[in-house]
Image: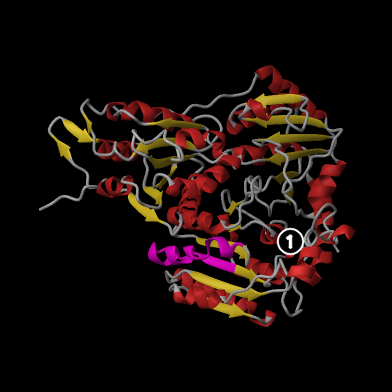
Amino acid sequence: MTRSPAAPETREGTMKLGAAIAEILKAEGIELVCGYPLNYVFEYAADADIRPVIARAERTGGHMADAVSRVTSGKQIGVYATQHGPGIENGMGAVAQAFGESVPILVLPMGYRRDEAHIAPNFNSTISLRSIAKSVEPLNDANQVAAVFRRAFSRLRNGRGGPVVVEIPRDMWFEDVTVPLDYRPVITTRSGPDPVAVRRAAELLVAAERPVLYAGQGVHYAEAWPQLRQLAEKLAIPVTTSLQGKSAFPEDHPLALGSCGRAVPRTVHHFLQESDLILGMGCSFTPSDFATAMPTGRTVIHATLDPAHLDTVVQADVGLIGDAALTLDALLAAVDDLVDGDRDRAPVEAEIKRVHDEWLAEWLPILTSDENPMTAYRVIWELIAATDPDNTIITHDAGSPRDQLSPFWKSTTPLSYLGWGKTTQLGYGLGLVMGAKLVHPEKLCVNLWGDAAIGFTGLELETCVRERLPVLSILFNNSYMAMETNAMGLSQSKYQTMEISGDYTAMAQSLGLYAEKVTDPADIADALKRGIEQTEAGRPVLLEFITSRELRVSTHGGDSYMSPVPDNFR
């Protein structure tokens, strides 16, 4: 019998490098390796009972690994593997996306043979990925495998998240490890803030008349959800989140304002503008077109894991450097020394409710509209009614679906909303929801995207079928790049640059999904019910809604629209 050249192989006193890597992954609790071949790690992982998950394109494999890390708060590290050369070249977008969102993923690209690695134009990951990775290192000596992976996992499990790259030349995989494989899982450490700064922050919080608590994804990675809620309730502080931090605080709580982003509920805008102090917890305050700018002239307490975040754009009066859970523990203890009992929450909760209800009343005619073509907002409103937020994980794609969903969807449990927006590559959402389903097969996992995004990763719907991932994809199809209306008027009028088309229901059916095309708003609710039932039966679903060219977005005061086409573009 001839053994496959990629099959694990051991001899007395030795171990093949690939088998050693699989053993290390197993020791670190890795259950999945996502990506696209050829990379020998898939065979060695399978031999170690680690499931390979093969996408249709390299980038989506990285997105799935990204979600594995996100929905486990980094407790299980997503692993992403690609072929050398064109494989990792195609996958650079996934690495860049994880870098922009501070997601810890282990990236295992094959490299060119060591005698070819530095010959142009061969792609060298250890050189080319440095600007979009937390660290990169080649593995050029089989006997150094434990040391190289120990460094990699230590960087993944400590400090701010980000991609960590270990490039393994393709001629290395079948070399022998001739020393004992001395590998133990790496330690995870946490650090807390300066006690003097904590005391000063507590004094400022207690003295503030109109504080706002802004929570980022650091709360998710620290699993600091109970402490966040305890602090808000003790001092009656209204809470908003970044898109990445959405679901860190239950949005059905009377102190919840909703999430920040390009689109916001009016409560967010109102309370930020009226604030005298902003406590940023587990956030970076990174500026973005798809983040809410913090108002100036406020006292700012900035709690972050990475000191490089301090004073980048938002100038801090107090900096608290450390793990969000430890920081909140320290703040709570300091506040307890200054305040007896909990403050009366009734006045601020009543104000939140008043502002929210006024805003929602203005939007309800749009959310419940019978106009045809239907508005995407009607679909979202029906989706909210059809789902249990406690048992749903939802994400969006870039563009209009993000801005239409985030103000209205109320996340009630941690890590139930995968928000993003620092870098906004089209096609990211489907891979995220697939990765979430890998980790949480018991939950309804939903992705909202538009007809532009499906053009980037639509064939990954076949991956959902093949890998048995019954996710619910909701597609808004208006045959148009509506979000670009204010920037492409001239090119559209002369050359129809924003027109796109496709019968995506037929495509999805041909790939083995349950798919429906919905053209009448009266049919939305029943279509959603059928789609959810199909996912519960184990079948991935695409529901294609033929929608209007919706331009209305809840920005700034909660009632703004997209700006018109500039005069010079008409």
Task: Name the residue at 72% across, 57% down.
Answer: 407
Residue in the picture at 26% in, 36% down: 17
Which residue is drawn at the image coordinates 75% and 54% (left, top)?
A: 263
Relative image position of residue 150 (x, y in whole percent): 38, 28
Q: Is residue 277 visible?
A: yes
Question: Residue placed farthest to the right in the image?
Answer: 567
Task: Let me know if residue 455 is in the magenta part.
Answer: yes
Q: Please state if 502 lies on the left or on the right of 213 as rendered.
A: left
Q: Locate residue 546, reporting x and y percent.
A: 66, 76
Determine the image quadrant of residue 13.
top left
Q: Which residue is mark 1?
A: 483
Q: Give the structural element (helix, strand or loop) at label 1.
A: helix
At 63% from the left and 23% from the top, the residue drawn is: 193
Q: Is residue 238 magenta?
A: no
Please tell me whether residue 185 is drawn above or below residue 246 in the rendered image: above
Looking at the picture, tell me which residue is in the foreground, 284 or 487. 487
* Nearer the observer, 5 or 277: 5
Give the position of the C terminus as an image quadrant. Answer: bottom right
Q: Which residues are magenta?
A: 453-474
Q: How many marks?
A: 1
Taking 115 as reference, is 455 left or right? Answer: right
